[in-house]
Image (tube, rainbow, N blue to C red):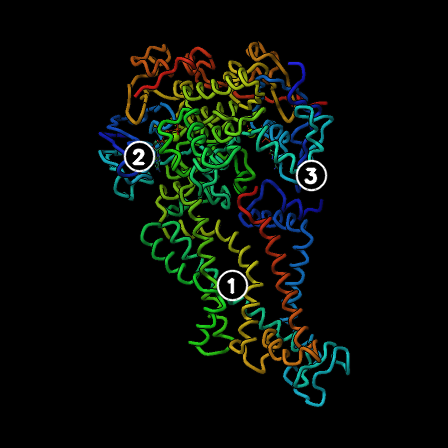
Amino acid sequence: MSTWRAQLLTDTPASRNQARLGQFYRGWLQFKRNKLAVLGLLIVLLLIVVAAFAPWIATHDPYAQDLARRLLPPGTQGHWLGTDEFGRDTYSRLVYGARITLMIVVLVAAIAAPIGLLVGTAAGYLGGWVDAVLMRLTDVFLAFPSLILALAFVAALGPGIENAIIAIALTAWPPYARIARAETITIRNSDYIAVARMQGARTARILWAYIMPLCVASLVVRVTLDMAGIILTAAGLGFLGLGAQPPMAEWGAMISAGRRYVLDQWWVATIPGIAIIVVSLAFNLLGDGLRDVLDPRKS
Amino acid sequence: MIQVRNLNVTFGQGAQAVRAVRDVNFSVAEGESFGLVGESGSGKSTALRVLAGLNPHWTGEAAVAGVSVGQRDARLPRLVQMVFQDPYASLHPRHTVDRALSEPLEIQGIGDVGPRVERALTDVGLGPAFRFRYPNQLSGGQRQRVAIARALMLEPKVLLLDEPTSALDVSVQAEILNLLRRLRRAHNLTMLLVSHNLAVIAHMCDRLAVMNRGAIVEEMDVATLRRQEPREAYTRQLLLASRGYDREVAANIITYD
Amino acid sequence: MSKPLLEVEDLRVTFPTPTGPFRAVRGVSFSLGRERLGIVGESGSGKSVTGRSVLSLLPPHARVEAKRLSFDGKDLLTASPGEMRALRGSRISLVMQDPKYSLNPVMRVGEQIAEAVRDKGAGARRRAMEMLEAVRIRDPERVFNLYPHEVSGGMGQRIMIAMMLAPEPDLLIADEPTSALDVTVQMQVLAILDDLVAKRGMGLIFISHDLDLVASFCDRVLVMYGGRVMEERHARDLRQATHPYTQGLLDSLPRIDDDRAELPTLKRDPAWLKD
Ligand SMILES: Nc1ncnc2c1ncn2[C@@H]1O[C@H](COP(=O)(O)OP(=O)(O)OP(=O)(O)O)[C@@H](O)[C@H]1O
Ligand SMILES: Nc1ncnc2c1ncn2[C@@H]1O[C@H](COP(=O)(O)OP(=O)(O)OP(=O)(O)O)[C@@H](O)[C@H]1O
Ligand SMILES: [Mg+2]
Ligand SMILES: [Mg+2]
């Protein structure tokens, strides 16, 4: 065993960071055994790389129109995946679209997960009227299908990618609040919380340092599994013309634009569709793998 | 050091109400070790949790070193701390030993964290090698040592112990009991120990109270317990039952109300 | 007692860990009739793993090998997961060590017991109530509706026992079923188990680290250390045990009538684990 591995797996780490890294490494060793999850992770990493290096990876300018070469099938005239109705290179648009997809996913997760975590843990830990008020609010949001609610928000805020993100985030947090609350309720009576209270810890500290770290695991899993849904909702909004606006290269909007040609030039709509499916599936596989590693009930 | 007068605790309301603790009185002198024994559900843990400030719904008087445990008095954390029964549930699964022991110091704004943590670990016989382990890298006995070290971080005068060894095997129990006796001497601790194991109480305590159905049945010193000469029939039955399994005894157990 | 209920020969359980395989059980053999068999030993000696491997309740990555592992003539090593589940639901029960962990924290305890009853339906609730009474819970009506965090430690353990006895199993594996009980209730719960063994012919594996209790309750005792059986004895003469490990365990118990200042702790000898 090489020394760094020994260092990570030691039973006597010498610092908090080494302990944390060690724990992380053990988790990775377990994660690694799930081949499908690793595949999911690789696809997600690929998405990130593609988004980061889009200008170098793309072969054409995604916005350059060339009406002479519209609706070309894949593999013709240097267009690997063909062109759309304005003669723009589908492959390059797909590559740039990765940026938007990733941005949507990251922003939604970064907005919705903390809101859900805060609302859920506060409701679960404080109980009483705080719980009642917060949970009724959550119920109101949960009562509508998220796409409908997002539609209403976008209709109110006006179409556009930023508003679509805000709308999706606002509709995505209630399930997270539910999860965080359920988790909090199972741990709020535990002895280590009682100990923290005896030591004089304030409620904010208990929530932040004791309860949230235990809820984060199941939230990370859930958010990862929801990524697919988020991508699809964003695509749905794009498809309805309420999300990304032309000429922006967003996968959902690309399908929407291609649907008119779906009978004769099937690839225009199908190729971005495949991209959405692959990325959604990858997030799902990743989430499954994370669940096995992070589930606090195990170990 | 510990004063409890007319303590009553009721859970629930109306027809569902349970009087978990009824009119309990006892006091424990400084440096003394006091035991609470009694059947399961007799209210021992509930009484202890009142003294720990973890149960707000009680009436009567309960004070540690003259400070009532009712108001969340800022002095209480440094006066009284508690060790729980289940070592697997009393440590936060995502906190290292180091974090668990530093928390009380950070909450109370006490500096000098590193050396104090190392000293506490040595004090409970673990040593610095254990400092950065997670609970899942510790055995039950080691976890209980960490829990004891954590309870002593704020140098409290009173240590509340809720069945500290009942989840541990006998050889580890012996180690923990030895440790508690040593710490008690070294820090002049006042201890309140809840257990249903009369032998553990006999080994650890100077005086004890026997509880049944939320009330104290009798109070005695440990010499009386050793001579097996209790006053009450309930306690005699408890003593008889703790001698090991016996068909006859089991058949003749009666419920005292 | 012609045919044993459970036969275990050379049971070995290995857990893969990042630092190499860990042999939790290393060659344990015993057979159980319709009797009370005690397994004692210090923490980590492999008692629970032994008990769980009979029921295939170990995590999937555990490797279980045995020359023989059979229940009532049925080979448990080749049984399908479905068959094992059927056995667990009806003929073999396990009372687990940590009641608080094993109970569902967001379900009323009475409902959990009712769920374990074999024939579901209207009778299940009544039967659950009977079981609560059988394990000497006062006020079963009230306790039925409590959540696990609202019951005391001892009550939690009795609720687990009630749950496991509800389907009337032929073999009960009780993993420290009474460690959180006070002595009188412990005695009554043991009497219930005793009756089931004597009258219904149930087989009982009683896992505990309370040597005095096992000595007075069981018929035979296995003393385990480091995944092996150190010795097997009639429970009656456990006190006369010659093995230094058993002796050490017995010595470390505090007793009501002695006033030793320090309790002797166990001195472990690596030679005990030599092949
Ligand atoms: N949070 C709660 N809500 C409702 N009832 C409770 C709660 N906590 C305890 N009780 C009840 O109070 C009574 C006393 O419980 P307590 O935990 O004090 O018993 P104990 O003497 O510590 O028993 P054990 O030895 O089993 O731990 C029990 O009847 C229990 O059901
Ligand atoms: N799922 C697992 N993965 C890895 N190791 C395990 C697992 N389960 C148990 N072990 C190890 O197997 C050994 C035996 O464990 P077991 O639970 O049987 O002990 P025990 O005799 O029941 O102890 P206790 O009295 O504490 O319950 C221990 O060293 C334990 O760490
Ligand atoms: Mg208790
Ligand atoms: Mg065990």
Q: Which label was assigned to residue B51?
A: 2
Q: Secondary structure at mark 2?
A: helix
Q: Indicate the amino acid at tag 2.
A: Leu
CB contact under 8 Å: marks 1 and 3: no
* Residue A129, position as x, y percentages in the image: 31, 53
Task: Write the residue at 23% across / 34% down.
Answer: B66
The answer for how far apart the CA atoms under marks 1 and 3 are is 38 Å
Q: Indicate the amino acid at tag 1.
A: Ala
Task: Write the residue at 42% across / 39% down.
Answer: C108
Task: Write the residue at 42% across / 18% down.
Answer: B199
Look at the image and tell me in which quarter the N terminus of chain B lies. top left
* Residue C185, position as x, y percentages in the image: 42, 22
Residue count near mark 3 (Cα–Cα under 10 Å), binned few <14, some 14–19, many ≥20:
few
Q: Secondary structure at mark 1?
A: helix
The picture quadrant where one finds residue B24 is top left
Q: Secondary structure at mark 3?
A: strand
Residue at image mark 1: A109
| Label 3 CB sits under 8 Å from any ligand 2 atom | no
Q: Indicate the amino acid at tag 3.
A: Gly
Look at the image and tell me in which quarter the C terminus of chain B lies. top left
- Which one is nearer the viewer's eye here, B81 or C94? C94
Q: Are marks 3 and 2 on the same chain?
A: no
Q: Is residue A102 above or below residue A129?
A: below
Tell me which chain the residue with mark 3 is part of: C
- Which callout, 1 or 2, points to the residue nearer the camera? 1
Quarter of the rendered image showing ligand 4: top right
Residue count near mark 2 (Cα–Cα under 10 Å), binned few <14, some 14–19, many ≥20:
many
Residue at image mark 3: C20
Tell me which chain the residue with mark 1 is part of: A
Residue count near mark 1 (Cα–Cα under 10 Å), binned few <14, some 14–19, many ≥20:
many
